[in-house]
Amino acid sequence: MQILTKTATEQLKALRSKTISAVDLLEQTIARCEELTPQLNPFALTLYSRARQAAQEADKKLANGSGGLLCGLPVTIKDSQYLAGYPCANGSHALSDFIPTETCRAVELLEQEDAIIFAKTTCPEFSLTGITRSDIYGLTSNPHDISRTCGGSSGGAAVAVASGLGSFSLGGDGGGSIRIPAGFCGVVGFKPSFGAIPREPCFPSWQSIVSYGPLTRSVADAKMFYQILSQQPEITAARKLKNSKIIISENLGFAPVNEDVLLAFRDVVARMQHAGCQVVEDNPGLTSSVVTWAVTASFDAAEHARENAYDLEYLGEVAKGFLNFGAQFNHADFEEAQAHREVIREHYTDLFRRNGSNILITPTLGCEAFPHGSIHPRRIGDTRIELPWLDWASFLYDANLAELPACAVPMGFGDAGLPMSLQILGPRGSDYEVLQIAGQIEKLIGWDNSIVTPTPSEILLSA
């Protein structure tokens, strides 16, 4: 299993040096999948036969040196992402028969570089929520503690990477859906600037806030996949933490944060200062953007459901609640929310400008992963809505609404022995600068990228 504890970069080096073949790497990955998936449930669909054929072709290319940048690397994509000829239920019985005839561009780019897609990962129904549970696929669990959530909506993706079931997964983030599970599962999750990685063809819902991006075992891997998928060369001058000015905010002025997360965050800030980084405390001067996000996301989702005439009898209760919540709004409400998005953008622009820095660091989440079934109702206006992420994910919405790049990086383990995470943000288009700083902070923290948790026996003992 040792090769499965490696990063994507290390696995690719082993493939190119013929230390391992693509077929052997895939078979080891599949064997581990078969051991762990009954307890963790990270996959909506396995594509083993297709992947085995691709691995054989990859070995032929590796033998003559003609393979792409990802030749022979086993990877996964999210259930919501189109792969022509294969089911794309997006976590819903309502779409159980949907088979796209096109492949989304980001997935095409992976296969053009000879990556081997061996599974599609679980997500909640329509990828609407920050936990990964659906009537069609059931519950996906955190590999560090299977009694706890893995987050969502790219929950299966984070679980796969954290468990050594492929070192990369393509996620989607419309309100923290890459960063939430990355934070809870102890992996790197990068939400690029809006539009940097192509999404289409795709489900039309949430078109103005969703970004596709990588979940990986290291920032270096995230950067490699970002470059491949965005097709944007790195032209940003190298940034060093030493002598850099970095903006930090413990709570953005409003976000609740547990004490263990706060202490871990302060420890990272102290390490940055010791490394010669100039730290300034500031925030955008905004209140929580959860209402703006909720109106934007729920109205858009409800409009999409209405246009596609989804039969509510096939929908789970959480999806019904979300769509019913969105149905109470009209186009004027939606446009008001979009106008407030511009206010959010302006506040972040001003934050970066007045501090002379393109980097803001916050916690990713205010807590460690919570037990399955923990729902924290929240009242928005006159409506009570049970969406279990509104408060503890308060740090995440602004990046989607303002279209900013944001990278979640593990920062150790909390009081419950579960991963905690910090978030590095920058202005739209500063993706490489964010990744450069994230990589240096990762090294400063000393996070062990070879951690793969758990072993099959450990899962059985905790069950």
Image: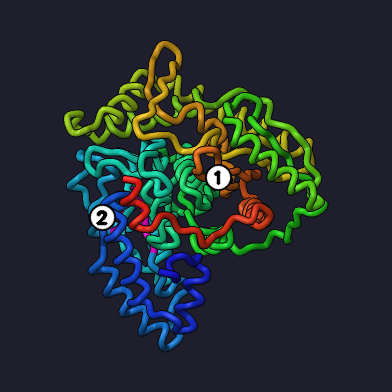
The amino acid marked with disc number 1 is: Phe
| Image quarter (top left, top right, bottom left or bottom right) of the N terminus | bottom left
* Relative height, residue 208 to residue 1 (above, below): above
Magenta region: 75-83
Q: Residue at x 69, y 59 (%)?
A: 236
User: Where does label 1 land, which residue?
Assistant: 413
Q: Residue 456 appears in which quarter of the rendering?
A: bottom left
Q: Residue at x 33, y 30 (%)?
A: 303
Q: SS of the residue at dot 1? A: strand
Q: Earlier in the sequence, mark 2 or mark 1?
A: 2
Is 79 within the magenta? yes
Residue 440 in sight: yes
Residue 336 at what x, y percent from top left?
A: 51, 22
Residue 124 at what x, y percent from top left?
A: 32, 40
Observer-nearest residue: 163 or 42?
163
Q: SS of the residue at dot 2? A: strand
Q: Residue at x 39, y 34 (%)?
A: 371
